[in-house]
Amino acid sequence: MQRAALLDAARALLSEGGTEALTFPALAERTGLARSSVYEYFRSRAAVVEELCEADFPVWAAEVAAAMERAGSAEGKVEAYVRQQLALVGDRRHRAVVAISASELDAGAREKIRAAHGGLVAMIVEALGELGHEQPRLAAMLVQGIVDAAVRRIELGAAEDPAVITDAAVAMALRGVRG
């Protein structure tokens, strides 16, 4: 229960203030634990971040997969892939993962995150193949690049409404620069 409380506090801190806000004193204050007790659960901030990714990324990916399963066509699956990821931007779990700087993680943690992202990208390879892409894996990575750029735009509080950014990202993913 303490570990879950620490992870929930970490999500809140990352969501509210980014990686700078995730400190052991702040975790201790949020959970009512002594600072030394936090070290009993995690050896470093990177360990907290790694565990958050392990816990939250599969849930996020399952939500994207469920949205894609509800789509009736290959194009609908690509649209659902983009829309669902962008719909999750406001979710604390997602905000925490986005706030994480990969440079703070050790090589093993970075590899786990890369593998998780690879699994997410793999979700649309088949749909892109059905749409006639000659290199559907490459196309999937480029679509994820569109999603990542839209996430950053939404996270920055861009002048555009998040719905406008989402619609633009879907149009870019489905029709390229033709709009």
Image (cartoon, helix red, strand yellow):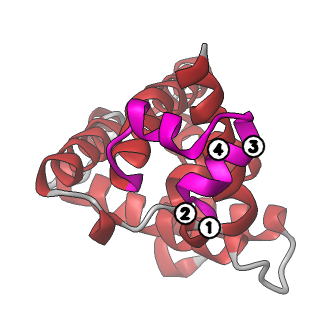
Q: Secondary structure at mark 1?
A: loop
**Magenta span:** 21-45
Q: Looking at this rendering, what residue extends furthest in the bottom direction?
A: 159
Give x and y (percent) for residue 64.
54, 32
Work out whether mark 1 precedes mark 2 in sequence or the reverse, and give the earlier one. 1
Q: Which residue is mark 1?
A: 18
Give x and y (percent) for residue 17.
70, 67
In the image, taking residue 107 as reference, residue 23 lies left or right, namely: right
Q: Quadrant of residue 152?
A: bottom right
Q: Residues within 10 Å of mark 3 (few under 14, many from 20)?
A: some
In the image, taking residue 167 as reference, residue 178 lies left or right, namely: left
Q: Which residue is mark 2?
A: 99
Q: Nearer the viewer, residue 72 or 59?
A: 59
Asked whether residue 72 appears in the rendered view, the answer is no
In the rendered image, the quadrant that contains the N terminus is top right
**Label 3 with label 4: CB-CB less than 8 Å:** yes
Q: Is residue 41 magenta?
A: yes
Q: Quadrant of residue 21?
A: bottom right
Q: Which residue is mark 3?
A: 30
Q: Residue at x 75, y 43 (%)?
A: 30
In the image, taking residue 154 as reference, residue 93 lies left or right, namely: left
Instruction: Say which amino acid is labelled 3.
Output: Arg
Instruction: Say which amino acid is labelled 4.
Output: Ala
Instruction: Say which amino acid is labelled 2.
Output: Ala
Work out whether mark 2 precedes mark 3 in sequence or the reverse, and give the earlier one. 3
Asked whether residue 165 appears in the rendered view, the answer is yes
Of labels 4 and 1, the one closer to you: 4
